[in-house]
Image (tube, rainbow, N blue to C red):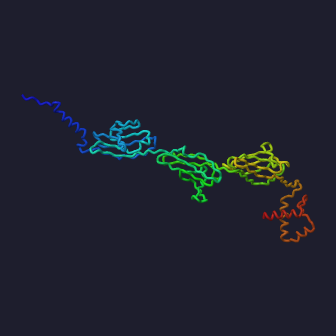
Amino acid sequence: MHMPQTFSSISIYPHLVYILLLLQCNDVAFGLVPDFLFPLANLTVPQGRDAIFTCVVNNLGGYRVAWIKADTKAILAIHESVITNNARLSVTHNDFNTWTLNIRNVKREDRGQYMCQVNTDPMKMQTAFLEVVIPPDIIYEETSGDMMVPEGGSVKLVCKANGYPSPNITWKREDSGSILVREGSHSNQKARLTSVDGEVLSLNKVTRSEMGAYLCIAANGVPPSVSKRMMLHVHFHPLIQVPNQLVGAPVNTNVTLQCHVEASPKAINYWTRESGEMIISNDKYYMTDIDNSYYSTQLQLVIKRIHKSDLGGYKCISKNSIGDAEGNIRLYEMELQEKEETNDYDSPDINEVNENSEKRLYNDFHDPSSREEESNLGLNVTVSSSCVISVKKVYLVLLIVWLQI
């Protein structure tokens, strides 16, 4: 009897292997091979931020995607498994055709070439570069602090910073003033610049006007830029200028004496009488110091209700560690001009005066002899029944009216 044919496990195994291989490589069998849909994009990421590479593969089939650090040839991840011992790395897959490599909190050592690779034969891959940039940072140990220089001397301010790319250093004055830079090594001429580039700022034959705060600003295109403030002190002995060395004022009035002081370092300023007696603020005297700049101060002494005893010489004195200076002012009495006291009944009516003045002006132009006759006879011009004005006063009024016309 003919027995039905059966398949043993041994005879069916080659067929199963063939079917599995066919299923795994069905895309290849039908002419569909894995292909990258988009190029892998280069990344520029500031240090401390996250970097994400995205690899889009069509028709992956049974093939696998791997991530490799190309410059070190280190395998980072295969498919959905991270191979390297780096907790900052992870891979994700959207169950379709997009694979991502995530690098958290990137560091400088993460910089380099990265590869997305598919294990076809021949192998398919695409690469991209990760640039890790670092914001600028001032190197305080190698950067100048506040500096002091005598007037006429030279000084160098140094500012250093690190970062990637290498930062550029720019110097500016805090008050937006000009920086005076010598033109050429042997030139006495100075150029006025709003900013100067370079790690070193050289100032020669420094003057007091160059005193102030300077800023070194480090920038490399990676925000934020950083800066450091340096104070340049220029030292010189005090100089006093007195706007008015001779001041007059009437008795029983207030008067203000002024001196302008330039000094660095800061000076001690005070007032004395000519005899050397120091003046202190009280009900009689009021003193103020008004700072105009780092080195310029205006001194004011107010003397209230001056008496005869207040007249005479005064001194404004300025002293610092380099030297001293003084200015002299003399206060004298100014006489007040007494005003003529007139009563209402003695005052002429201004309308009558103007009318008679116009008549007088007309006669003067048309009959000059009448003016001489009145002058010779010593006549007075009657203004009203209660007021008589002399010819000289009338002439004065005539002149005023004529000027108004």
Quadrant where the C terminus lies? bottom right
The x, y position of residue 46, in whole percent, is 46, 43
Q: Residue at x 35, y 38 (%)?
A: 77
Residue ranking furthest to the right: 377
**Of the pair 316 and 92, the residue shown nearer to us:** 316
Q: Residue 98, located in which quarter of the rendered image?
A: top left
Q: Residue 204, located in which quarter of the rendered image?
A: bottom right
**Of the pair 211 and 381, the residue shown nearer to us:** 211
Quadrant where the N terminus lies? top left
The x, y position of residue 269, in whole percent, is 73, 47
Q: Residue at x 80, y 65 (%)?
A: 402
Judged left or right of residue 360, residue 26 is: left
The x, y position of residue 358, in whole percent, is 83, 65
**Of the pair 265 and 313, the residue shown nearer to us:** 265
Residue 321 lies, with reference to residue 10, above or below; the image says below
Judged left or right of residue 149, residue 341 is: right
Residue ranking furthest to the top: 1
The x, y position of residue 290, in whole percent, is 71, 47
Q: Residue 374, located in which quarter of the rendered image?
A: bottom right
